[in-house]
Amino acid sequence: MSMLARMLTVLRTDEARQKAREYIERRTIPIPHAGCRLWLLSTFTRNGYGAACFRGVLISAHVLAFHAWGGTMPNDATLLRHKCDNKWCCEPSHLIPGDEYLNADDACKLFRMRKKLTSEEVREIRSIYGEGGLVTQRDLATQYGVCQRTIQQVVTGNTWLYA
């Protein structure tokens, strides 16, 4: 059983969700002007998100908060995105379900992804994309760590004219 599935089993009653909310509130601090509720304890070192251990289940603090306040994940959602762009935020109203593509789009809009492509990468992108649409611009953007708009500019020839 996955970590999330175990957590959802733990949170199946109103009483358990209330205990989880209390757990989150005791371990966070509100940031008035931003509206965030920041996690104060340990983080997962690999990704920097808050690490919560609730009823024996280790889970990302923002995921626990989202479900404790009654959030549900649509079938096509694979992760939670932070509208505030703060990994330590556990404010449920700042958390929205999404996928890696939407998350990458968020990163581009917030200028977190500023990778510059090399001439070789531009040629690869044009070659892959020119093979008949087997790969989307979003897929290429995720693969190369850039915005979808950057890929669009590359494949349409609006940038990198001499690559």
Image (tube, helix red, strand yellow):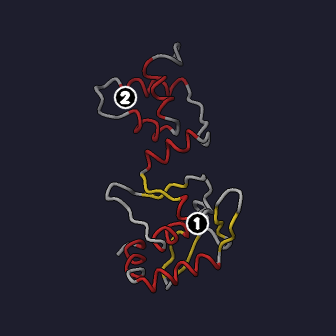
Outermost residue, top side: 162
| C-alpha distance separating marks 2 and 1 | 39 Å
Residue type, mark 2 in image:
Ile
Q: Characterize the local packing of mark 2: few (<14), some (14-19) or many (20 or more) Cα atoms within 10 angstroms.
A: some
- In the rendered image, residue 125, in percent from the top left (x then y), is placed at 43, 28
In this rendering, the answer to whether 138 lies above or below 76 is: above
Which residue is more in the foreground, 5 or 12? 12
Assess whether mark 1 and mark 2 are in contact (beta carbons under 8 angstroms): no
Identify which residue is drawn at 38% across, 56% down.
Answer: 77
- Numbered label attached to residue 53: none
The kind of secondary structure element at disc 1 is loop
In this rendering, the answer to whether 148 lies above or below 38 is: above
In the displayed structure, does residue 37 sit left or right of residue 1?
A: right
In the displayed structure, does residue 111 sit left or right of residue 32?
A: left
According to the picture, the residue beneath numbered tag 1 turns out to be 90
Quarter of the picture holding the N terminus: bottom left
Which residue is more in the foreground, 69 or 76? 69
**Lower position in the chain sequence, tag 2 or tag 1:** 1
- In the rendered image, residue 74, in percent from the top left (x then y), is placed at 34, 59
According to the picture, the residue beneath numbered tag 2 turns out to be 128
In this rendering, the answer to whether 118 lies above or below 97 is: above
Identify which residue is drawn at 43% across, 71% down.
Answer: 70
Identify which residue is drawn at 41% across, 23% down.
Answer: 126
- In the rendered image, residue 31, in percent from the top left (x then y), is placed at 70, 63
